[in-house]
Image: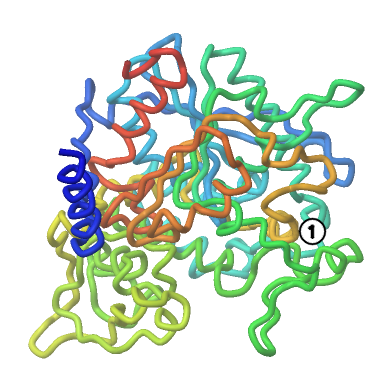
Amino acid sequence: MMLGRVAGLLLLTLLSGCLPIPNVRVELDVAPPSYRVPLEEVEVEYVVRPGFDEQHTPSELNRTAYLRYSIDPQPETLVLLMPGIFGGAASFDGLARQLVASTPGLEVWAIDRRSNLLEDRSAMVRALRTGDPEVALDYYIEGWGRPGGFTPLAFDEVPYLRYWGIDVHLRDLHRLILDARARAPGVILGGHSLGAALVSLYAAYRVGAGDEPAYGYQFIDGLVLLDGALGRTGAFARPDIGFAVGPLRLAPSVSELESGDGAPYSNNMISPRYQIEREVAAILARLEPDADAPTQLTDIPMSNRALVGVRNDDEYGVVPIFSASLGHAVGAAFDGNLGAVLLGGLDGVRSKSVAGLAPGAERVTWDPGDPARERTDLASYVRSWTLEETNFAEWYFPLRLALEMTLLDPALEDADGFLPNRLVPVPTLALGAGRGLLQTLGGMRTYANVRYGSPITAYVLPGLTHIDIVSARANPAVPILQRWIAFFTGGGPGG
């Protein structure tokens, strides 16, 4: 009997060494959110609040703001969302509406960093209120740099931007979080892209002083990272040497900024003009979607809708990583897209440029395409770009913020003013985008490793681009956030 059992175990051992180990895979399949009110009925209010008192800055400019999305008069849980690089509060418009419309007791504050409040959007607002897109076109495009038209802020007009780094932005954020804690018992802090790295830094940041210092994580109930993480969208442990591509100087070093050298805000490829042209194009597409796009913005005949699509879709953009999946151009002749290849990797190889009209076409138009591939609705995307209260983009992104973030090590072991990340216990939800920056769980490994032992939950949302994760229709991030928030706020909204 004993010999038989031994022989049986031996046989099983041999078989297990010869047979493949099963690897059963279940793909992420999230049910779409259901809405208790139409998305357009979510209430939106723009709130400006005093910010940190940065000593080099005029007192009236030490301020920050947020878009408040709400339905319920008294929220149980409040979610604050920090935008990514070159992003404004309205970049969360799609996600915020879906979260609030589908989740009882939830309120969302989408943050505008202090630099967004420097923008002259006066003609954008006039165009929207009068229904005349020519108002914006004349002021920003025809009038660029001319008397009576728009002139971007000169570097010497904003010397204080040289001091708007991590400390200033985290202290601005802390003031908003204190406001949020006074309004709701549960507070969740989230961020997209660079914003995800920034809110991660807040969790470890020393916000108090004295013998018993307080740290950011003590003021929040959870942390949400949307296609961004330390080690991927910030905290690279770089030396302070600035950035350059060959002879093209993209950003100075922090030490150069402090001495008054170099541009204090981004003015190269992602410049104020680039962002303003996208905003004007969106106003044209909202007010006159089927009209011919102005020759000041394109030399190829196309509709205003197509103009927004071509400038913002991941298939045609120069930088696919900053694009949404919106549809495809119809009636266009195509060429290669070298910039996308250099900057976008495999997705860049798939990209192409709209080079002209296809044979027999009179103009380029836009088709929404297959919703299984094209995850963001163009009309909703245009709405996000054309809110009266504020905008999708950040015209004057302060380079010091990004530069200082690159200097930190993800572990924060010896970083002045920070708790080592291994001691930060806040529950964290990390959501990557399958066609974005964090395409696999491996992209989140660095941050998870420096937070070892912490409750960290991670998913990759298939098919979404880096921008889709905040703008997609029926966004799969919404039901995941609902369930996760409910779990970490004691059965609050969505529970």
Q: Name, please, the residue furthest toward the left.
A: 360
Q: Is residue 349 visible?
A: yes
The residue sitting at 61% across, 47% down in the picture is 116
Q: Observer-nearest residue: 59 or 419? A: 419
Vertical order, 327 against 352 (above or below): above
Say whether residue 219 is left or right of residue 130.
right
**Residue carrying label 1:** 157
**The quarter of the displayed image where residue 59 is located:** top right
- Name the amino acid type tagged 1: Glu
Is 28 in front, or is 94? 28
Taking the spot 41% from the left edge, 87% from the top edge, the residue there is 338
Residue 308 or 95: which is nearer the viewer?
Answer: 95
Residue 337, position as x, y percentages in the image: 36, 84
Vertical side of 407 occupied by 91: above or below? above
- Quadrant of the drawing holding the N terminus: top left
Q: Looking at the rendering, in which quadrant would you find the C terminus? A: top left
Looking at the picture, how far across and down is residue 235, in whole percent?
A: 67, 56
Query: Would residue 380 be found to the left or right of residue 320 on screen?
Result: left
Residue 361 is situated, as x and y percent measured from the top left of the image, at 11, 83
Residue 392 is situated, as x and y percent measured from the top left of the image, at 46, 49
Of the pair 273 and 314, the residue shown nearer to us: 314
